[in-house]
Image: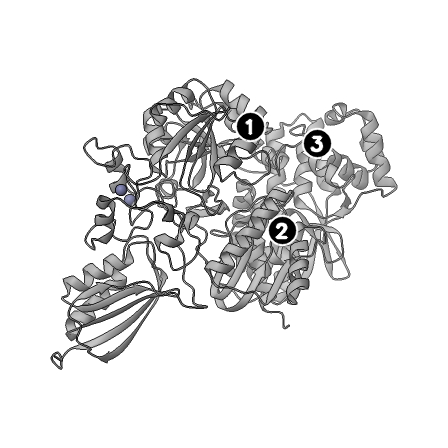
Amino acid sequence: MRVARAERLAKISVRGVVQGVGFRPFVYQLATRYGLKGWVLNTSGDVRIGVEGGEDSLQGFIQDLEGKAPPLALIEDVSVESLPSFGYDRFEIRHSLSEEDRYQLISPDIATCDACKSEIFSPSDRRYRYPFTNCTNCGPRFTIIEDIPYDRPRTTMRHFQMCPDCQREYDDPLDRRFHTQPNACPVCGPSLRLIAGDGKTIPGDEITISNQLLRGGKILAIKGLGGFHLACDATNDEAVKTLRERKRRPYKPLAIMLPTLDEIRGHSELSKEEVELLTSPHCPIVLARWKDSSNVSRGVAPGLKYLGVMLPYTPLHHLLLRETGLPLVMTSGNISEEPIARDNDEALLRLGGIADYFLIHNRDIYARYDDSVATVEEGKTQLIRRARGYAPSPIHLPFKSRQVLGCGGELKNTFCLTREEHGFLSQHIGDMENIETLEHYENTIELYKKLFRIQPKVVACDMHPDYLSTRYALKLAREQGIAIIPVQHHHAHIVSCMVENGIQEPVIGVAFDGTGYGSDGRIWGGEFLIADYKGFERKGHLEYVPMPGGDAAVERPYRMAISYLYTLLGENTLNGKLNFLNQVDSFEIDLVKKQIEKNINSPLTSSCGRLFDAVSALLGIRKRIDYEAQAAVELEMAAPDGFGDIKAYPFSILEQDGVRIIKLGDLFRAIIADMERGLAASEISLSFHHTLAQMVARMCRTISDETDINMVALSGGVFQNRLLSRLTIAALKEDGFTVLTHSMVPTNDGGISLGQAVVANFVEC
Ligand code: ZN
Ligand code: ZN
Ligand code: FE
């Protein structure tokens, strides 16, 4: 029987993050509330809805679809087609439809919601103390999905058959676990196992015993969402020291997890925005001001003013943290630069020398996924490491892109696949210096290609011929006969910053970082460019100095100090008056001089990172480094927090063939004079930062006067330096510039794959 004529059928397609976030039950409940009939289903590309009923009800339904969507849904587009009514007799959720070549966005993993949290702490609940509790609004997503559409058989949860109670929740459109793919309970779901280093299972309650072990100073490897953490009592100096020794990481800062926001406040000063970020569903590690009164071991972040803090984001974390009552170190389960360990066997093998015990479980992790790391500057979130809670959500592109793969750089690698208006910037992959990371990289590229149905027609890479990512690009281009576009490192940095700010017109790009292969074959890193998506012109840079010994100069910053002094001020400067030289073997000083003089393995660099290294070593702050940019970070930390009038050091700008070169001789002469006057390193550090900000401001003014461009994009790892960023932005704004900075795309090399892909998209091939 046909329904009344006033009724019609609306066919609706919703795109965005609308799967795995409780969208279909929401649609079901909404349709029921409006008395509408029809269906809803997931496809590979969207959520499709057919609803029929009266005009007012349909209008209300469509309005609420966007207005009242579940918290984790991110609606990008709703399109509605009006048809004559069909005569459905009820509203139903239909089977998912898999379609070739369509794609949809995939939710990142989401921190445990309040409803689930209260269940695991309620003794009467059937999920009391169950560490794998989740629901439509929280839990694992990206780390368990193997293909789309997102349904249980295509996740690592397919190995667990739901019990009748869980199945009932799953089938009930009014239940908050309706179609929750990772739904589980103690009867049917994954379970914990605690094992000793020798592989023997420890009987008893895993969480209680783990807590006893942690309180006793032991190191545990704990399987989480995207891999293993190494955990220990963060207030126990000895435990932290042991962890560092075993991990072979004497200085690199470790993150800690605390049970509640109040607990975090006991150790860190938090701004309103930092609180919001910590408690958001992304739940990243936030680098927040470390209180002097905190009893967290200083060994957790030696020499730093900031402490990486986060809240528990899985039920297992909540249970462990609440029951130990301790701040726990929670650092990636890996040795030095290998990727985070994922599988149980792999963890036992690779972390066997580090952890005393292993708290494991039997839910497989499909994608490795590190914790994200963020800072908040002037109220704005800045991701330093973009992974859990953020990837694989795309970066919105201000244009429609071809399918391009940007292969990224070497350190802090990510890759980026583009399609239409989406830039799928991968989660942090790691430093591409070993075979394990390369394998992780290749596998993750394949996963993204599959999930987002992307077959790149163009591959972009860095210009550095020896990067593993460049070699991967070359291999891909050769095997698949696709075009390869090398993109200059700093051009990629600047474009990544433009893209995330939605800017397409040319900007003045200031790219300050450690290392990037230049178009002239030298090592760039203190660059002033005029750039847009199609190309760039190098308008200026820090002056070139040799890097004696290449990589050795990166690991031993005093080599850079010697290089600057010797090159800019002459050999006489390197005399007994300079304290830092007394700590260097005189044989090595002679060797460095010889390397510079004879140009033996001493590539020229304009790197701002190396300039920081040199000043740090010259002031006696850091001779050798354990992690990237350590010397520069410690130089920043040396500067005082508050400051009134700051002195700037002199510098000059020289024009050569239309390119402006910032000469640094006067700067070093002035620093040495201040040292001889006995001025504190803290004062010198502050003036040095201020001077760099002045250099940027003066260069940008000159370039702007020539080009009429009034917008400056700041990018490159050096801008992780919060003091330098603050001073530079202030100086530029004071001069009337519009300043673009990073937020969701890292300013370090974790962002360049996006810039590469965008530049390559605009190359005709
Ligand atoms: Zn939940
Ligand atoms: Zn169950
Ligand atoms: Fe870089």
Residue type at mark 1: give it.
Answer: Gly
Can you identify the residue that label 3 sits on?
618
Mark number displayed over residue 66: none
Q: Is mark 3 within 8 Å of ligand 3?
A: no
Quarter in which the N terminus is drawn: bottom left
Residue at image position (54%, 22%) is: 241
Q: Earlier in the sequence, mark 1 or mark 2?
A: 1
Residue 119 versus residue 705 in the image, above or below:
above
The residue under label 1 is 303
| Residue 170 appears left or right of 572 | left
Residue at image position (59%, 47%) is 439
For residue 569, side relative to residue 298 (left or right): right
Circles 1, 2 touching at the beta carbon (< 8 Å): no
Q: Residue at x 74, y 62 (%)?
A: 658
Residue 54 shows in the view: yes
Q: Which residue is mark 2?
A: 409
Counting residues from the start of the chain, the first of labels 3 and 2 encountered is 2
Q: Position of residue 355 (x, y in %)?
A: 51, 26
Looking at the image, tell me whether mark 1 or mark 3 is earlier in sequence order: 1
